[in-house]
Image (spheres, rainbow, N blue to C red):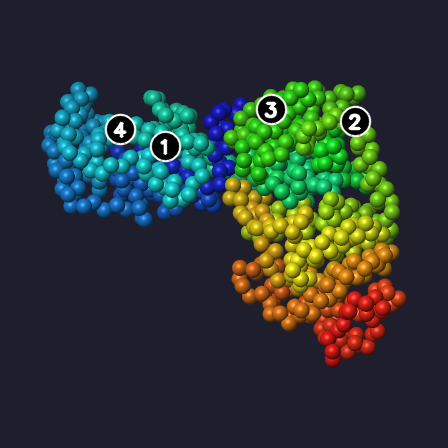
Amino acid sequence: MTRTPLDSAIASVASEPVLLVACDYDGTIAPIVEDPAAAAPERESVAALRLLASMPDTEVAVISGRSLRDLAALSRLPQEIHLVGSHGSEFDVGFSTALDDDLVDLRNVVTTELEQIADGHPGVVVELKPASVAFHYRRVAPDVAERMVAAVHNGPAKRDGIMVKEGKKVIELAVVETDKGSALDRIRSDVSASAVFFIGDDVTDEDAFVRLAGPDVGIKVGEGDSAAAYRVADTTDVARALAALAEGRRSWLEGATSNPIERHSLLSDRHTFALVTPDAVVNWMCLPAPDGPAVFAELLGGHSAGRFSVALESGAEPISQRYVDDTALVETRWADLSLVDYLAYDEMSASSVLVRSLSGDCTAIVEFAPRGDYGRAPTGLQPTGSGLTVTGMAELLMLRSPGVVWDLREESGSQAATARVVVRPDEPVVLVFGLGPLPAFDEPTLRAKVVEEAEEWIGRLDIPETTHRHVRRSAIVLRSLCHEPSGALAAAATSSLPEHLGGVRNWDYRFCWPRDAAMTVASLARLGSLGEGEAFLRWLSERVAAASAPEQLRPVYPLNGDASIPEAILPELAGYRGSRPVRIGNAAEHQVQLDVFGPIVEAVATLVDRGMDLTDAHWDLVCDMVSAVERRWHEPPTTDPGHLRKRRHSDLGRGRPRTPERLFLCGVPRKRGVLQGGGQPQRIRRLSGFGAYAGHEPRLRQCAPSPLALRSGLRLPPA
């Protein structure tokens, strides 16, 4: 089925952060009937409005020329839906406006005059409203109606202070200056809507249509001139449009099209990361920094937040996806197409490039839609001789795609590109995306280099035979999270993936937690890889040197440097499967976490046990960790609720008592700093509970420190 411009507009507005859905009543959700008192709403429209009103960050209003009392009685809509009567002068609870005595007197005089004009004509209805009087003449003969309308305009309508509104077979004389546009603006402001969807049929609805701008969508029902951008025929089409909006809104909020987290594949060159879905969509990638803004963020923000997809023109689904041997290369296969995705570091641009290599015998459809700042900043695309340049970004980003012809289109305030790519057995198609300017790549050579380096590393590991395959892949994933330029380790490649679907505990973990990183490099060291640990210790020594004192080591740092990483919420993004809010940055940097120090010393000991030379810098780091524990040991736990964040595991120093686990993790530096043998830390049995520190303190005092320990001035407090 062909998608119409209205379908695209509805899909776009459905993904707005805070959406206001508003409509007229008669002729919009209720058909026009001879007896106004019998105008019942379409059941399908009511069902769609109810569903929309039940959704988060979605407000619904019905703005009608009817009195509020009649509107409520006829529509029987729930209280979650704002009802506005009398063309915007009569609001529901919380919006009521009282008339002063002079206006009430003026309204009553006008009412009397209209009743005199209607006298003798039973088809005319004079409807008294709180701030206006409506003169309905739908059920009288055309010639009689013409005389009556003239009498109204030449009589009560000319009184000072009277505002005239004309609709379909109705004239309304109001004593306050209001219209549906003002009412719409008032509700928009009150609910802080980022976009409005308004649909109406009457002449008075034009006041609302002319107020729409930007991402707003206006739909005119029926014929006649209108400022609305779109049009439908009747109330049945209105019900269809509202149903489509409700379905699109629910899909966006719940992420109904999202793939399970565990089915994503991780790409890494240890400079940045990307995720690939089972159907070959790159739905997460940050450039140039892995903890910076994402250029593809469909994972958290849906279709409009950026993606890079490859699919068969036939629509056939992939039959398999796998990592290529012991690498971070991912191959997605169809019957007639093989797609290999990987990240590689380009020395010329000093940045990562995403390579997508298509081979086979088929026609593929490629869609390229990068977005700035997690999809919040509009971006454009500029064709070049060898591909596309992305505009509107702080960095120059390019897609190198020689021979590919792109079709550009507007999409949610940005541009997207689609190409029909013919792949032949001896003519693979290579797409390379990264910081520009991008040179020409010999893709087979580049891929061979990436594979060789990965296989050389995995070949050095001492992996146990038990669950050999799983340990090997786990080691590759852990190494993939290492940030090679700095030596830091990212806790995760993504932000705001939820602990529970629909939950709010969605944190940005793209940063380095010294505690977690220490445990990671210790695990890799046990498998025989020391390089990651040595790089991490260099990075950590720089963080300690930059701190005012060792005990001021923060729980979390950016991957580069010591800058603050303030936490912020992105309301524009729906979150993974509706799990909101989406956060960037992490306020944990302000927390007190005394469990930071122990794993660091444990990691040093493990690395030395596995063959790393214990340098003075390493020992100074151990001494700093011991010093930090000694200075903060008796510090009370954090009690400021603003610094607390619940966790399942032992979140030490975050408002919790001094548990055995806390004593253990704080005691490790003191044990490791004292137990020496020949200048090298010995492998000692981990002790649990209070015995890790308090119970064994007398025995620790009897241990003679090594010359290196004496030189460092390390001492336990006197007994």
Residue 685: quarter of image = bottom right
Mark 3, residue position:
382
Q: How far, Cα to Cα, is label 1 from label 3?
A: 33 Å
Which label sits on residue 211? 1
Residue type (three-letter) at the residue carrying disc 1: Arg
Within-10-Å neighbours for mark 1: few <14, some 14–19, many 20+: some
Vertical comparison of 384 with 35: above or below: above
For the point 75% across and 69% down, the residue is 670
Q: Earlier in the sequence, mark 4 or mark 3?
A: 4
Q: CA distance from mark 2 to mark 3?
A: 24 Å
Q: Earlier in the sequence, mark 2 or mark 3?
A: 3
**SS at circle 2:** loop
Mark 4 falls on what kind of element? strand
Image quadrant where residue 398 sits: top right
Say which residue label 2 marks: 442
- Extreme-right residue of the structure: 678
Marks 1 and 2, how far apart at CA: 55 Å
Mark 1 or mark 4: which comes first in sequence? Answer: 4
Query: Looking at the picture, how far across and down is residue 321, in whole percent?
Result: 74, 36
What whole-number distance in Å separates the C-alpha atoms at marks 4 and 3? Answer: 48 Å
x, y (%) of residue 42?
37, 34
Query: Which dot, 1 or 2, sits closer to the camera?
Result: 2
Q: In front of the other: label 1 or label 4? A: 1
Q: Amino acid at mark 3?
A: Gln
For label 3, the SS is strand
Give the percent coordinates (x, y) of residue 296.
62, 36
Front of the two marks 2 and 4: 2
